[in-house]
Amino acid sequence: MLRIVLFLVLIALAGAGAAWVADQPGDVVLTWGGFRASPSIPVFVLCLGIFAVLIVLLWSILTMIWRAPGRMRRRRHEKRHARGRHAITHGLLAIGHGDTALARRHAEAARRHAPNDPLALLLHAQSAQLDGNRDEAQRVFRAMAEREDTRLLGLRGLFIEAQRADDAVGAVMIAEEAIKLSPSSTWASHAVLGFRCARGDWSGALAILDSNLSAGLIDKPAYRRQRGVLLTARALELETMDRDVARESVMEAVKLAPTLVPAAVLAAKFESEAHQVRRAMKLVEAAWLANPHPDLADAYAHVKLGDAARQRLQRVETLAAKTPADKAGHVEGQLAIARAAIDASEFARAREVLGPYVNDPTQRVALLMAELERTEHGDGGRARAWTLRAVRARHDPAWTADGYVSDRWRPVSPVTGRLDAFQWQTPVASLPSDKGTTIESSAFEEAMLAAPPPKRVTVASEVPAEPAVAAPAPTPAPAPAAQDNAPPVAKEEPVTAPAEPVKATLDAAESSPVAETPVFRTRADLGKPAQAPIQAVIPIIRAPDDPGIDDDGPSDEFTEQIGTPRDQAKAQAGGWRGFWSRWGA
């Protein structure tokens, strides 16, 4: 609407001007040599306008002719650039869906039409990577690293290729060069931080962490947590070499990250050695409420040096009472009480605490029950049964990071190099063994863990019977002489078939004069009649992730030396080698 009004105004002004010029009287005299003209003023203005239009048209034609070559060159360049962009776009799409041949064809087209385009170089490098041509990919990434606009991208590609070639030294050198060019580069700072942590260069790692905070890569809470992790790692490393530096580091770490378990444990240890018992207890309690852990319970129990076992038990009960019952850490508190109760010979208290967990035990619960049976009653059979259940029991929480399970806390993940990656959680359960190779021993475990039967049937050994001798005094008719190889005769009670196959198996094993261990029988053999017991070793098929028992390592405290040395060697071997050695005999 505004444009229409403006156009009408301009038309009105032009008409008014033309009318004013037409109303002006007088003539204009032009003399040029012998030529003389005297037009009126309106005619002169009209001729002057036509002349101006002709001059403008002539200038436009001359300019177009002058600029035609440059315009043709620019149009040809634009066509090449458009073709290059088209090839780059479709080449990146081909890389995205994994079409190697199409990506290579578009990369060649992009290199012809747009050789200096950064995206063309990137497409060429990625197509070479997709095709498995690492030498070509490295050559292109080096060319990108020499350019000012693609230097950081080229260094990133060279870093990835160095990682694929397992060249750790080259990778860290490239990452350090990239972080010099751009301190705010996330991948470079992450890589350099991981490498320095892997080398144990905690001062360098702390410097990188400060640089990340200055560059705005992490916020203040994350910085405090990660700095506490690095200080804790340095304190653990210097604990035996420089205790002053270790104490200073862990005290700063526990202020920055009070819920970090290893920091709280080590700080409590230093405070306990300095006879600061209350301060040590507060440190452990703060970490326990956030993340109940067995190391925290152990540190809390031994916070006061020289205490008796019963005093440690009372202290652990106090710590466990601080954990809400609806929290997952309630189990850790109960297991810590059971551990302290066994050490204090409070076996009834240990059984009371472990009672709710024996139906579906974890590995730690089963091992505590095995130790309880052996310590309280000296029952090696029930202890071995609980140890057998521990092999197939559910996993307890462990330090886990990116699928990697560690027996101790670590500051960085060995899989991804991520800082503060380890968490105290239950790892992924291992897959069950094949049914064809698993020995069904659930009935045996139930029989071992059940209460002993009040009465059992005993059978006489099969020995040749001597002939009976008649008494001299007058007695009833003498008994006929027994022949050799007579069948066994029951003593005092008639022999009756046992009500359950499991009881028959146990009775046959207990009546054997050769083997002191009950004879193991599979589920398929439970219905068969019991034969003469033989000396046997119970085979245990381990889970796939179970490392087994070292051949030359110390034997388990619950393992009894049974059988010949060859059988003992088989029983001690662990893992898949032990499995094949047992079945190969």
Image: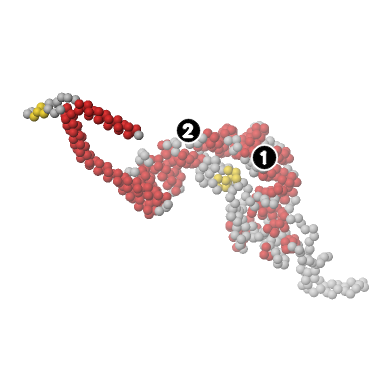
Q: Assess whether mark 2 and mark 1 are in contact (beta carbons under 8 angstroms).
A: no
Q: Above or below — where is 106 with respect to 282?
A: below
Amino acid bearing label 1: Thr
Label 1 vs label 2, nearer the camera: 1
**In the rendered structure, which disc, 1 or 2, sits on the residue that comes first in sequence?**
2
Q: Residue 585: x, y in percent? A: 62, 63
Q: Residue 233: x, y in percent? A: 56, 38
Could you tell whether 523 is left or right of 260 in the image?
right
Could you tell whether 75 is left or right of 517 in the image?
left
- What residue is drawn where x is 70% and y is 66%? 527
- What residue is drawn where x is 73% and y is 53%? 379
- What residue is drawn where x is 72% and y is 45%? 353
Q: Residues within 10 Å of mark 2 (few under 14, many from 20)?
A: few
Q: Which residue is mark 1?
A: 323
Could you tell whether 73 is left or right of 227 in the image?
left
Where disc 2 sits, the SS reads helix
* Residue at the farthest right position: 474
Q: Nearer the viewer, residue 277 or 17?
A: 17
The answer to whether one can see residue 219 in this image is yes
Where disc 1 sits, the SS reads loop
Q: Quadrant of residue 119?
A: top left
Q: Which residue is mark 2?
A: 214
Amino acid bearing label 2: Ser
Dot label at residue 345: none
Q: Above or below — where is 71 with respect to 511?
A: above
Q: Quadrant of residue 475?
A: bottom right
